[in-house]
Image (tube, rainbow, N blue to C red):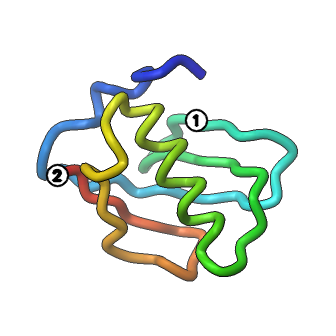
Amino acid sequence: MKKGAFSHLATPGSTLAVRVTPKASRNAVEEVAGGLKISVTTVPEGGKANRAVEKLLSTALGISKSRLTLTHGATSRDKVFRVD
């Protein structure tokens, strides 16, 4: 995945619906109907997967991690991020 490949989604104030697959074989970001599908190799314990998703999403959007806020779904596979 190229850095900033999904930069067209990084408008300030927008929200992004994300479906997460933890413990995947590789890290990946895909655009699907209704949002993004993110696969991370990290296990979902102690917030590790959330941090990995945040890092991967910020790279895909071409923005810093500090501009992303997890608003819904901290313990769910379906998450909503807000771009600041």
- Which residue is situated farthest in the left direction here? 13
Position of the N terminus by quadrant: top right
The quadrant where residue 72 appears: bottom left
Q: Position of residue 34 (x, y in %)?
A: 43, 50
**Which numbered dot is residue 47?**
none
Mark 2 against mark 1, which lies toward the viewer?
2
User: In the rendered image, which residue does mark 1 sit on?
Assistant: 30
Q: Position of residue 81 (x, y in %)?
A: 34, 60
Query: Callout 1: helix, strand or loop?
Result: strand
> In the rendered image of this protein, does residue 1 appear above or below residue 34?
above
User: In the rendered image, which residue does mark 2 sit on?
Assistant: 84
**What residue is at 31 percent from the left and 35 percent from the top?**
63
Q: What residue type is disc 1 on?
A: Glu
> In the rendered image of this protein, does residue 3 appear above or below residue 50?
above
- In this rendering, would 82 be left or right of 38? left
The quadrant where residue 43 appears: bottom right
Out of 25 and 48, give the one closest to the viewer: 48
Query: Counting other residues with Cα less than 10 Å from the Cα at mark 1, is it few (<14), some (14-19), or many (20 or more)?
Result: some
Q: What residue type is disc 2 on?
A: Asp
Out of 20 and 58, give the one closest to the viewer: 58
> In the rendered image of this protein, does residue 28 appear above or below residue 67?
above
Q: CA distance from mark 2 to mark 1?
A: 22 Å
**What residue is at 52 percent from the left and 40 percent from the top?**
32
Q: Earlier in the sequence, mark 2 or mark 1?
A: 1
